[in-house]
Amino acid sequence: MSTAPNRVALAALPFREFVALIAALMAMNALAIDAMLPALPAIGAELGVEGNARQWVVTAYLLGLGVGQIVYGTLADRFGRRPVLLWALGGYVVFSGVAAISASFPLLLAARVLQGLASAGARVVAVSIVRDCYSGRAMARVMSLAFIVFLAVPMFAPALGQFILLFASWRWIFGILGIAGLAVTIWTLVRLPETMHAEDRRPITVKDTAEAFRLVLTDRCSIGYTLAQTVLAGGLFGFIGSVQQIFFDIFHEPKLFPTMFAAIAGTMAIASYTNSRIVERFGTRRVSHSALLGFLFFATVHLAFALSGHETIWSFAVLQALMMGCFGLTMGNFGAMAMEPLGHVAGTASSVQGCVSTVGGALIGFLISQSFNGTTLPLTLGFAISALVGLAIVLATERGRLFRPQMVPAG
C-alpha cells in the first residue's frame, strides 16, 4: 500500500517534516515524564515529601493526561484539528510555568495534573491527524517512525534533567518544558495545515457523541487492543514510577541511572524503527503478536531472577531492555489496529482509547510502583502479570487465533 496520503493534500508539509512534527507532539509527554525522574529526591527534599510519595509527581501528570483525552477528540471532530491543538499547546506552556514556581507539593501536583490535561490535546490530535492522512499498514509505519522520536526522548530526558540539576534548581526542568512547548506551538502555527475536511466535522450533540462512544467501545478490535495496550502500559508506568528508587536505593548507582535508562529506552527506539521497516511486509498482527510472546518470555525470566535473589544491575538492565524492545514492536501496532475500523470518528476514537489506556495504565503502574519494597520483585511481578493478561486479551480479541493476516483496505 502506498504511503501517500489518502485524501488530504499535505504539500506544505513534506512527509519527513510531518513525521517529525507528530513525533515532537508525542515526545512532549515523554519529556514531561522522564526529565523529572532524577529530580524527584530534590523535589521531595525542598517540598517536604519522602519515599514512594514522590512518585505522585509522575502519576499526577499521567492522570491528567489520561482524563484530558476524553474531551479533545469530540472538540477536534467539531472544530478541526489545528485550533484545538494550538489551544492545548498553549495550556502546556502556561502550566509548565506554574509548576516551575510552585511553592508547595499540592500546588505542584495540581500544576502537573493541569499540564497533563493540556498535553492530552497534543496526544489525541496528533493521532487524529495521522488517521486523517493514512490508514492500515501505512498508518502503522507513520506511527512507528513518530514513535522512534517519542522513545528517543526517554533516552536523553533523565540525562537532561540531571544536567540541569548540576547548574540550576529542579524548577528549571519545568522551565525547559515550557520553552520546548512554545517552540512546538510556533512550529504548528506556522507549518501545519488543517487536515480534516469541513464536511467531516461532527456537531457536538449528545446523540452523536454517544453514538461515537458506542462505536469505539463496542468494536471488538478497538476495545480489545485498547485494553491490551492498557495493561502493557501499566507495566511501563510501573517501571517509570519506581526506576529512580531501584537505581538509587537498591543498586546504589545514581550516576549510572541516566546511562542505563538511556540504554533500556534505546531498545524501544530501535524496535520501533525496525517495526517501521517490516510492518508493511509482515503485517501488524504477525509482528505485534510475536513481540507480545517475547515480552511474556522475558518478563517471566526476569521474575525468576528476582525470586531467586540473583538480580544484579546488569541482569536488571539487560532483561528490562529486552522487554522494552518487545514493547516497541507491540504498542504502535496495537494502537494502529485499535484505530483502523474507526476512521470516520478518529478524533473521538483517539480520545476514548487514549483515556482508557493512559488512566488505566497509570493506575496499574501506580499500584506496581507503590509496592516498591527495596527489591525489584514488585516490578518484575507486575510486568509478568501485565504480559500474561495482555496475551489473554489479544487471544480473546482474535478469537484464539494469533498471527492471522490483516485485511488491508483499498487506498
Image: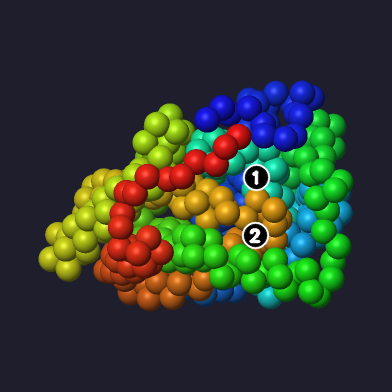
When asked about the image quadrant of residue 88, the answer is: bottom right
The percent position of residue 148, horizontal first and vertical second, equals 50, 37
**Circle 1 residue:** 131
Question: Where is 41 relative to 135, above or below?
Answer: below
For the C terminus, give its image quadrant. top right
Q: Residue at x 67, y 31 (%)?
A: 5
Foreground residue among 233 and 179: 233
User: What numbered label is drawn on residue 380?
Assistant: none
**Numbered mark located on residue 349 in the image:** 2
Q: Are marks 2 and 1 in contact (CB under 8 Å)?
A: yes
Q: Nearer the viewer, residue 344 or 329?
A: 344
Q: Amino acid at mark 1?
A: Arg
Looking at the image, which residue is at 35% across and 64% down? 399
Horizontal and vertical percent position of residue 114: 74, 65
Number of callouts: 2
Decide: is 197 above or below 205: above
Residue 139 in sight in this render: no
Q: Residues within 10 Å of mark 1 (few under 14, many from 20)?
A: many
- 276 and 406: which is toward the camera: 406
Q: Compared with residue 235, is residue 155 higher up or lower down, i.e. above or below?
A: above
Residue 35: percent from left, percent from top: 57, 50
